[in-house]
Image (cartoon, rainbow, N blue to C red):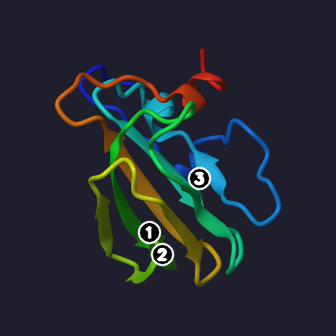
Amino acid sequence: MADTYRIARLDEIPPPVPREPGSYEWKPIRHHLGIHAFGVNAGIAPQAGDWVVEEHTELGSGAAGHEELYFVARGHARFSIDGEEVDAPAGTLVFVPDPATLRSAKAEVAGTTVLCIGAKRGEAFEVSPWERKYFR
C-alpha cells in the first residue's frame, strides 16, 4: 500500500462486533484506513426496517459532541431528526450540526448503506469514547 493513499471497499472492512438483530453492520472506515482528522464510519442494513443509524445525540458519556454528515450511498433511508421524518433516497446528504439533536435512520430497502462523517467544530479530532472501547 502506498503511503500517499489508501484504498478499501466497504465489503472488505470487517465489522469489529457482531450485528445485533434489527441493527446495521458497522464498518469502521476511520480505523481501517488510519484516518486521524475526522470520524467516518458506514452502516449497512441487511433488511428493510433495520436501523442504519442508531438513535442518539452527540452528547453524553459515549459521544464526542460531533457535527455529523450522513450520506445515503445505496438504498433508501428514513431519518428521524428531533422527531421530524426525512425521506432520504440514495444520493441524499443529511447534515446535523447541533450535537444535541436526536437523530436516527431506518432502512427502507435491504442493503441501505449510510456513510457518517463527523468531528467537533473548531477542535482537533478526538476518537469518540464509544469507538475507543473497540479499538485501543
Task: Name the N-terminal-most of marks 3 and 2.
Answer: 3
> Disc 3 to disc 1, how far (Cα)?
31 Å
C-beta proximity under 8 Å, tags 1 and 2:
yes
Return the x and y of residue 54 as percentages of the image width and height. Answer: 60, 58
Which kind of residue does numbered mark 1 sit on? Asp
Residue sitting at x 32%, y 75%: 92
Q: Nearer the viewer, residue 93 or 123?
A: 123
Q: Position of residue 61 (x, y in %)?
A: 56, 30
Q: Residues within 10 Å of mark 1 (few under 14, many from 20)?
A: few
- Nearer to us of marks 3 and 1 is 1
| Disc 3 target residue | 11
**Which kind of residue does numbered mark 3 sit on?**
Asp
Q: Place residue 93 in its image quadrant.
A: bottom left
Identity of the residue furthest to the right in this view: 21
Q: What is the number of the mark on residue 83? A: 2
Task: Tell me the element at label 1.
Answer: loop
Q: Is residue 39 left or right of residue 49?
A: left
Residue sitting at x 38%, y 37%: 65
Q: Nearer the viewer, mark 3 or mark 2?
A: 2
Would you place residue 40 above or below residue 134 in this image?
below
Distance from the alpha carbon under mark 3 to that under mark 2: 32 Å
Horizontal side of 75 relative to 88 (left or right) equals right
Residue 2, position as x, y percentages in the image = 32, 23
Q: Residue at x 44, y 44 (%)?
A: 58
Q: Position of residue 30 (x, y in %)?
A: 44, 34
Amino acid on which disc 2 is placed: Gly
Q: Residues within 10 Å of mark 2 (few under 14, many from 20)?
A: few
Instruction: Say if 56 sits above or below 64 in the image.
Output: below
Distance from disc 1 to disc 2, alpha carbons, whole Å, reads: 4 Å
Query: In which quadrant will I find the C terminus?
Result: top right
What residue sits right under mark 1 in the picture?
82
Instruction: For mark 2, give the secondary structure.
Output: loop
